[in-house]
Image (cartoon, grey):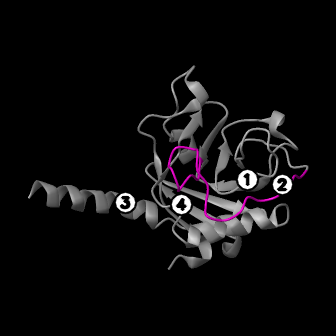
Amino acid sequence: MIRILAVLAAVLFAVPAFAQTLPAGLDKANAIVIDTTKGRIVIKLRTDLAPQHAERIKQLAREGYYNNVPFHRVMDGFMAQTGDGQNFNGTGGSKYPNLKQEFSKVHFARGIVGMARRGDSVDTANSQFFIMFADGGSLDNQYTVIGEVVQGMDVVDKLKKAPPGSSGGTVTDPDKMVKVQVASDIK
């Protein structure tokens, strides 16, 4: 009986997050909706800046690759990284080949979404991405900008962060992307 009540309560509390309306004027074909353990984040994909990367994000979302994937690296005042649907710890990528960089002049400011890559290897972006908590000018022209948060930065701010001084910003028991969808696919 207690389990049934717990499941019912979880469903009731999840309904408001999943029932939220999307921002007016949003190009739903080029936006992703991320329902997390903390709430909903909506990202406008910048197909004008990074068409290959935006298509990869949409492809993986449609395949369910991002569902239940953790925000494995979250550094307060810097960024929250996710997208490793292979190993769930930041070491994996998708079954698809890495992408060639698509750098732009867009500044890495609060709410900008960029593609993660392996170390200094420029053309190694695959499935992982990060959302900026604050200004990150040192990333300009070093990482591909794929989008910007247009709704839910308050949710991003609530993500569990790594303790100060932790190695690489790794989070223990991290928040997750419960479900990721292309906005136009939401029924």
The quarter of the picture where residue 137 lies is: top right
**What's the distance in space between the residues labelled 4 and 1, CA to CA?**
15 Å
Q: Which residue is mark 1?
A: 125
Are the residues flagged by discs 2 and 1 in contact, CB closer than 8 Å? yes
Labels 2 and 1: the sequence-earlier one: 2
State the residue at coordinates (85%, 41%): 140
Mark 2 or mark 4, earlier in chain: 4
Residue on which disc 3 sits: 14
Q: Hey, what amino acid is under mark 3?
A: Ala
Q: Is residue 129 above or below residue 49?
A: above
Q: How many marks?
A: 4
Task: Name the image quarter holding residue 110.
Answer: top right
Choose mark 4 or mark 1, whichever is in front: 1
Which structural element holds mark 1? loop
Q: Position of residue 125 (x, y in %)?
A: 73, 53
Tell me: residue 126, above or below residue 60. above
The residue singled out by tag 4 in the image is 66
Say which residue appears at 57% left-offset and 63% top-offset. 33
Q: Cα distance, mark 3 to mark 1? A: 32 Å
* Spot occupied by residue 17 in the image (x, y as percentages of width and height): 44, 60
Residue 74: percent from left, percent from top: 57, 36
Q: Secondary structure at mark 2?
A: loop
